[in-house]
Structures are given as C-alpha cells and as structure tokens.
Image (cartoon, rainbow, N blue to C red):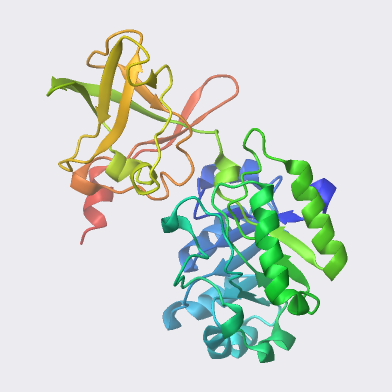
Amino acid sequence: MQEQSGAKIILALKGFAMWSTFDVVAKYLKGCTCSGLWEARLAREEFCKYNSDAEVHTYSPAFKETDIDEIARISDDIVFNSPSQFWKYHKRVKKINPEIKLSLRINPEVSSSPVDLYNPCGLYSRLGTTKANFDEQIVPYLDGLNFHALCEQDADALEKVLQGVEEKFSEYLYQVKYVNFGGGHHITKKGYDVDKLIDIIKYVRKKYDVEVYLEPGEAVGWETGYLEASVLDIVDNGMKIAILDTSAEAHMPDTLAMPYRAEVRGAWKAGEKPYTYRLAGNTCLAGDVMGDYSFEKPLKVGDRIIFEDQIHYTFVKNTTFNGIKLPSLAIKRKDGTMEVVKEFSYEDYRDRLS
C-alpha cells in the first residue's frame, strides 16, 4: 500500500508495542506514533535501532512541563492538541530541537466510530481542535495537520471523514507539508478495500501537494497473535462455567470495554454444539466473563482455551488486578519453535504498587 500510494505508515504504539518484533516491523514501516514520553522513548530506543531513518511522532492531549523537553529531544514530529498548547510550547521545542516538525491535531467533527467510548470526534470530545476553535495565526508555523476519527473501520468511513476535513480545513491543507490520517484503518482485515484507500491518498497528495501519513496500531498486529489459557475448574450454577487462568478484566479489557466477543479456537456460539460453557476469569469481579461458547466435546480441567487475535490492544492494556499473573509473551517461529521473550514475576506485581 505504501509503494502504490506514496504514503508513509507509522506504527501506533498504543495498539501494538511488542518491541521484540521490531526487527521485523521496522523493515516495512517508517516509524512510530507515540502518546507521550515513554512511548517516544520506546520508539527511539527499540524501533530506530533497526531503522535509522525511522520517524518518531509524539502526540498528547496535553503535554506536561516535566516531559516536554525530553519529548522534543527524541521526537521528529510533535503534535499539539490545541492552539493553547501550541503557543505554550512551540518556541521551546524548536529551541531544543530545531529540526522538529510542528503539527496540530484537528477535529473534523465527523465520525462513524461504532462505539462512543472510542469515538475521538464524538460530542464534547477533548481530542483535536474544532474549526470554531482553530487559530489561523498558527498556520505559518505548522508543518502538518493531523486528524483521527476511525476505529476498526474501512476506506468508506475514511472517505466520509475526509469530506468533513475538507469542508472545514481545506484552505489550511494547502499551506502545510503533510497530512496525517491517524489510525483506525483496518488495512490488513480481509475484505478491506485497499485500492480505494490508495486512491484517496493519491487524491489528497495531488490536490494539496502534501505527504500523507497513516498511523494504524491494530492493523499491524491484526490476526498475528492469540492468548492461550487453561481451564482451572468447572462449576455449575444453572449452566456450566469454566474458570480459566486468565481474566477478561485484567488481560482482555477491550472485550468488556468495547465490548466484543473474542473468537475461541474450536468453539461456536452458545447452543450450536452439544456442550455449552460460560468462560470466566479467575478474579473476584462478578462480570469477569468472556462469554458463552459451545464445544463438540465436554471441557475438562487442564484443557487449553485459545482466544484468537488478542495481540493488539490487549497486552498494552493488561493489568495485575487481584494479583493475577500477567500472561507470558512468546514468539512462534516459522519452524514451529516457541520462544518465550518475557515472563512476569511476583516482583513485577509488587514493584508497580509501591
């Protein structure tokens, strides 16, 4: 897609940050987009060592005084959320890093995000500057404009958002060097209209004479990793309930927040096969439930349960709630070998609390 459209794709670390895979990812992507100082450090220290030309873009809804100087030193591009943040810091970051590019996040107030919790352009959103709050005096200082309005969506959704961007901000697009389309593009999902995305990018590049960036996170890790758990016990309270050595609340929070039903390998919807179970986590939270699934054979203690496609927006969010051990991180090699790259200990739990 990059080759055919001329766009640059950078990795959103908020969605996928397994740096032990960066030797592979850095071969293809042009850098990282970061949500603050620590992600920017991870990008600079662990991604850029595999790609010396990689770019580090850093955005935050509001930057902290204690972080801004180091962010300026290690970033190639800094994205301000509001005119007030821009005026507060733009001279300071340029003094620290004269080569740093300055950008402003805009809010086109158009989105078809499927869930309000993940709608960055929803009512009363704090993310991005609306046209009513835009300050034209900033434009001569800007290298780029950023917008982000999608969540696991296709090129049709991007097309609608772009219409809103052009209606409100087209005069400024002519005056900057690049436009960042943000994330939420489900490029690697089966059925995604990649050709349409390429056409949209080409259109923007030609019309406004700008570079175009995209910054997906989920699409980078889409269907590349699963969470493997085991059955600890099976209880019966009106239905069979399998208690697992993992947790939706602690280890798969998006399944509760989004919410969505994770696919389980070898399982069907409740009632479709002879044996239906509720899969539940091993915490005290009553709602720590993954959902109801049916199987061709009865489950038994010790059986392995594999939740598909849990590498993105999963371990970047997981916690040690209830003192539950975090799942180990492993890489399965093409020859079938499994390399455990990170195993968590009691000390990891203890040291984050005091």
Quadrant in which residue 124 is drawn = bottom left
Is the C terminus in the top left, top right, bottom left or bottom right quadrant?
bottom left
Task: Using the image, determine if residue 116 lies above or below residue 67.
Answer: above
Residue at figure coordinates x 29%, y 44% from the top left:
250
Q: Residue 102, position in %: x, y?
A: 66, 78
Q: Residue 190, position in %: x, y?
A: 64, 33
Q: Residue 251, position in %: x, y?
A: 33, 42
Is the N terminus in the top left, top right, bottom left or bottom right quadrant?
top right
Q: Nearer the viewer, residue 103 or 259?
A: 259
Residue at figure coordinates x 56%, y 50% from the top left:
217
Residue at figure coordinates x 59%, y 61% from the top left:
33
Does the rendering let one see residue 144? no
Q: Nearer the viewer, residue 160 or 213?
A: 160
Task: Using the image, determine if residue 282 lies above or below residue 139.
Answer: above
Does the rendering let one see residue 265? yes
Residue lying farthest to the left in this orientation:
237
Horizontal side of 39 relative to 180 (left or right) equals: left
Q: Nearer the viewer, residue 227 or 111?
A: 111
Residue at figure coordinates x 50%, y 79% from the top left:
68
Q: Nearer the viewer, residue 290 or 94?
A: 290
Quadrant in which residue 213 is drawn = bottom right
Q: Residue 62, position in %: x, y?
A: 47, 77
